[in-house]
Image (cartoon, rainbow, N blue to C red):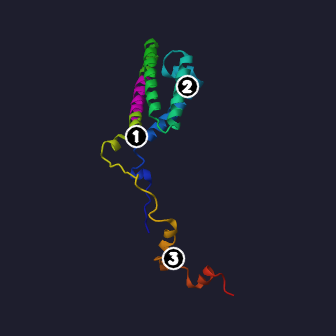
Amino acid sequence: MDMKVQSRSEEGHDNVPTPQRVARGLGWFSIALGFAEVIAPRTALRMAGVSGEPGLVRLYGLREIVCGTGILLSSRPAPFLWGRIAGDGLDIASLAAGARSARKRNAGRAVGNILTLAGITALDVYAAAANARGGSPRSRSGDEPRRDYSTCRGFPRAPDEMRGAALADFVIARDMATPKALQSYTRMGPRR
């Protein structure tokens, strides 16, 4: 018997991230970045290629931690994602101001970081817009019908009426039945 087992990722179901998964990833990214900015603000400034105030970087880190925690703990992460977008705007403005005063060798690094932030901001906008609508953009465009389960009330009959209903016409397949030699041990115990 040659059976191929196919994982969910091979079928393609897990390859497309949902807006909720994107938001969750952004939440964890925000927390990690926030802790890095709070713990080592000078290193963050040096890696960004700008000179600046470490106290301001710590405040930006606290903002990232608050937004990330809100995204992960809230059942409606959209407001926290919009907060991330506003924060990204502040970060881009700060990097642009720092890039103007940076030395020539660090200016390229600052511009690269601004472009990276622009990409992350685009991801934030996607996640915020999709989560504000309550799902992916595709599910709101009318391509998929909405399922309404408001009229479902549970089981069609009471549990006492359903108990044993499957056994009424059930027949054990011959290859699954207990062999005749062992049947005396399965129902009443061993014969004496």
Compare marks 1 and 2 and give the one earlier in the sequence: 2
Residue 3: image x %, image y %? 43, 64
Left or right placement of residue 181 versus residue 171 in this view: right
Residue 102: image x %, image y %? 46, 14
Residue named by callout 1? 134
In the displayed structure, 134 sits above or below 63; it is below
Compare marks 1 and 3 and give the one earlier in the sequence: 1
Region rendered in magenta: 112-126
- Residue at 56% in and 17% down: 55
Task: Assess whether residue 185 is covered by the magenta stretch.
Answer: no
Label 1 CA crowd tier, 10 Å (few <14, some 14–19, many 20+): some
Amino acid beneath label 3 = Met
Residue 35: image x %, image y %? 57, 28
Residue 162: image x %, image y %? 49, 69
Q: Are marks 1 and 2 in contact (CB under 8 Å)?
A: no
The mark found on residue 62 in the picture is: 2
